[in-house]
Amino acid sequence: MAPCDGDIGSVDPEVVAFARIADERLREDPRDADALFVLAASRMACGHLADAAATLRRLARVRADYPGFWQLKETVHDALGEHRAADAAAWAAATHRDS
């Protein structure tokens, strides 16, 4: 998956670099929680919110207690206009007290 699918100029080059590294790590280990989180965050930064949400679903199956997971999930769902899912993620963040 390309980091920003051609709109690289509008995104911090470090985001693009981190996305590429995450992509490489996921080829080696599809269950790499760090790489999944970085990929989800980078997809969100690139404006690919549906991809970010899909990557977060993968991360949830691997490690739903990943630090920052619920906050990122809330942000992505809110940006998608999925307010119930965003509220549920906010509640889960408060319950899990992740950071």
Image (tube, grey):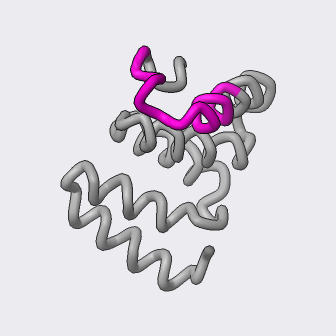
Quarter occupied by the C terminus: bottom right
**Up-down relation of residue 92 to residue 75 (above or below):** below
Percent across and percent down for residue 51 are 41, 34
Q: Is 21 covered by the magenta stretch?
A: no
**Up-down relation of residue 50 to residue 97 (above or below):** above
Q: What residue appears at the point 48 percent right and 84 percent down from the top-left corner?
A: 94
**Up-down relation of residue 71 to residue 73 (above or below):** below
**Up-down relation of residue 68 to residue 96 (above or below):** above
Q: Is residue 54 left or right of residue 79?
A: right
Percent across and percent down for residue 78 are 28, 59
The stretch in magenta equals 6-20
Q: What residue appears at the point 39 percent right and 75 percent down from the top-left corner?
A: 90
Q: What residue appears at the point 67 percent right and 35 percent down from the top-left corner?
A: 18
Percent across and percent down for residue 58 are 55, 42
Q: What residue appears at the point 66 percent right and 62 percent down from the top-left corner?
A: 66
Quarter occupied by the N terminus: top right
Residue 54: image quadrant is top left
